[in-house]
Amino acid sequence: MTPAGDILTGRLLLRRPAVGDVDAILDVHRDPLACLHNPGDRLRTRSEALERLHHWTTHWDRHGFGYWTVLTAPAAAPPALVGFCGLKFMPLHGEPALNLFYRLAPTAWHQGYATEAAAAAVAWAAQHRPDLPLVARVRPDNLASQRVANRIGLHRAPHLDHRGEDGPDLLYQATHALSPA
């Protein structure tokens, strides 16, 4: 497996999270709008943000990929941290799968950043882990997240739907996982 490095898109830089991102992890994950559809993900303290970073870093160390910190591309002056996006292993009906995650600060919404970052993560998975199903778990009332999943080529997979920690999950699956190349 090739470890994931930085990913540069047209407008974004996705890089491995670092200790210097802890305050941003806290800011994004304590924002009630950012976690509206996943209230169980809300953080309240810096120590919770450090623990979240520790989980992310452990996944990176174990698997060579994970959640990226999403920043506006270096050409933008100055680059701004806008959120987090990436992949992690998860069980899906008893089998290993990749979960696609994207959460941006509300100040970065409606600019296409979630779509751009998520598309980069899916492209990385299609190249480096085409053997695994890739899914995005989306709450039924999170229409914006559903639109992102559709825009990046994921398709509704109702047969995979299940109850998540914060309510029902609608699952969207990447085409590469439906018919590996």
Image: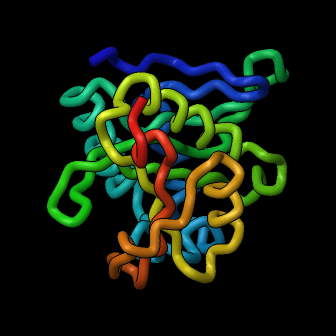
Does residue 124 lie above or below 46 as drawn? above
Q: How is the image coloured?
A: rainbow
Q: In screen coordinates, is 149 left or right of 175?
A: right
Does residue 78 lie above or below 170 as drawn? above
- The x and y percentages for residue 147 are 70, 62
Residue 144 picture quarter = bottom right
Residue 20 visible to an observer of this rendering: yes
Residue 17 visible to an observer of this rendering: no
Q: Assign the C terminus to one quadrant of the image.
A: top left
Q: Nearer the viewer, residue 29 or 130?
A: 130
The residue drawn where x is 82% and y is 55% is 110
Q: Assign the N terminus to one quadrant of the image.
A: top left
The residue drawn where x is 27% and y is 46% is 89
Q: In screen coordinates, is 63 left or right of 154?
A: left
Does residue 22 lie above or below 46 as drawn? above
- The x and y percentages for residue 34 are 61, 65
- The x and y percentages for residue 17 are 44, 32
The residue drawn where x is 79% and y is 46% is 112
The residue drawn where x is 77% and y is 24% is 10
Q: In screen coordinates, is 22 left or right of 70?
A: left
User: Outermost residue, left direction?
Assistant: 94
Total count of labels = 0
Does residue 41 lie above or below 79 as drawn? below
